Image (cartoon, helix red, strand yellow):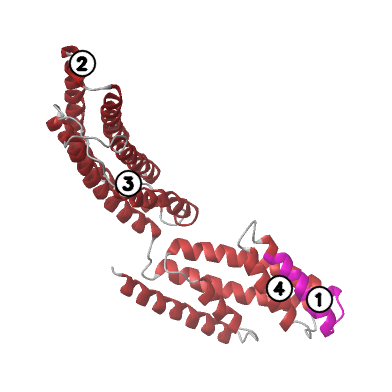
Amino acid sequence: MNFSSIHVIHGLKTACAAVIAYGITTLFNLEFGYWAVISTVIVMQIYVADSVEMCLYRLSGTMIGALIGVLVLLIIPKNNLFIGTALFFTIGFCSFLTRYKSRYRMAAITVVIIIMTGIDAENIFVFGISRVFEIIIGILCAFLVSVLILPKRRVDVLMKKLELQSRACSEKCGILVDAFIAKQQNVEEILVDELVKDVWDNHELLQKIKQHEGLIYHEKFNSNFSGKVSIMSRSAEHLRNMVRTLNVLDENGFDIILSTELKKIASESGKMLILIMKNQPLPAAIKNLEEQINILDTGLLNLREKGLIRRFDAKRLIQVFSFYSSLLYFAEDILGEAKKL
């Protein structure tokens, strides 16, 4: 689904929720029913997680704002000077509290609604409860439409992101290994910087899914997303370490004897990472990656026993083994996560 169709659906769903709220308030002949309609527009978001979050913010903010607004109307004299003063302090207070919780922005909106429209109300308590009831109608309409009609879930976005990131990770790992084999060529750090940033955004997205979608769509959330997000973050960090290792020295390096083994372990690790993100069968891939890790370990041991690493000076030796280590950590991390699954 492309972005244009997503926004078309969002527009239709928002309009649908607003009309439903309007119909309910008309049916019950509510005096200020337009607040229900306005609430649906405020609350409705493209993704279910965002809509649920806005519902909770709007609901809690409405309760707090209504309480403050009713208390103000009960206490202050009904003239412009005191009303203006009350608005100044209550809006300022609620806005200040947004540094702790963003829901207080909704409290400020509700305070304005209650104070500005309830000055001449005969029964302040009934007036405040009525406004809360109308806003709750709008919240419920937005929530039900968001969840029941063509829901767009953040969990689906995360699943797609993880698959794309795993493919990018596999591709970039191959590029870095090729640069290492080609006499330790330098590479641009931007090669992995954007990937690292994108990968770390997964944590915030996962938290939002846990808090808001996890309780609604259990079957979607039971896949081990926490482990997948974690292994993707660590994989990207291993790639960044490889980049930094390659860029430590500028002069020409040496040919690498175990080039074939390095390419294979990079390839098998990348394939495994993609399979993990796509929830594909892993046993055969686990066996292949284990074999490649053992082959590389054995090859390194043989090189040391034959004294073939003596051709490296101290700085080049550190660079070479740092790259080997980062690549092995990359492979072993992915293998460990695969075995958990």
Relative horizontal placement of residue 304, taking residue 318 as reference (left or right): left
Q: Amino acid at mark 3?
A: Glu
Sequence-earlier tag: 2 or 4:
4
At 15% from the left and 13% from the top, the residue drawn is 306
Contact? badges 3 and 1 (CB < 8 Å): no
Give the labeled residue for mark 2: 304
Closest to the camera, between mark 3 and mark 1, is: 3
Q: Is residue 303 magenta?
A: no
Give the labeled residue for mark 4: 111
The secondary structure type at the circle numbered 2 is helix
Tell me residue 26's x, y (percent).
57, 87
Give the labeled residue for mark 1: 85
The secondary structure type at the circle numbered 4 is helix
Q: CA distance from mark 4 to mark 3?
A: 51 Å
At 63% from the left and 67% from the top, the residue drawn is 105
At 29% from the left and 29% from the top, the residue drawn is 319
Give the labeled residue for mark 3: 189
Q: CA distance from mark 4 to mark 1?
A: 13 Å
Closest to the camera, between mark 4 and mark 3, is: 3
Q: CA distance from mark 2 to mark 4?
A: 75 Å
Given residues 41 and 312, the one toward you in this image is 312
Sequence-earlier tag: 2 or 3:
3
Q: CA distance from mark 2 to mark 3?
A: 31 Å
Closest to the camera, between mark 2 and mark 1, is: 2
Q: Amino acid at mark 4?
A: Val
Tell me residue 93's x, y (percent).
73, 65
Q: Main secondary structure of the magenta part?
A: helix
Closest to the camera, between mark 4 and mark 1, is: 1
Sequence-earlier tag: 3 or 1:
1
Q: CA distance from mark 2 to mark 1?
A: 81 Å
Relative horizontal placement of residue 31, taking residue 177 as reference (left or right): right
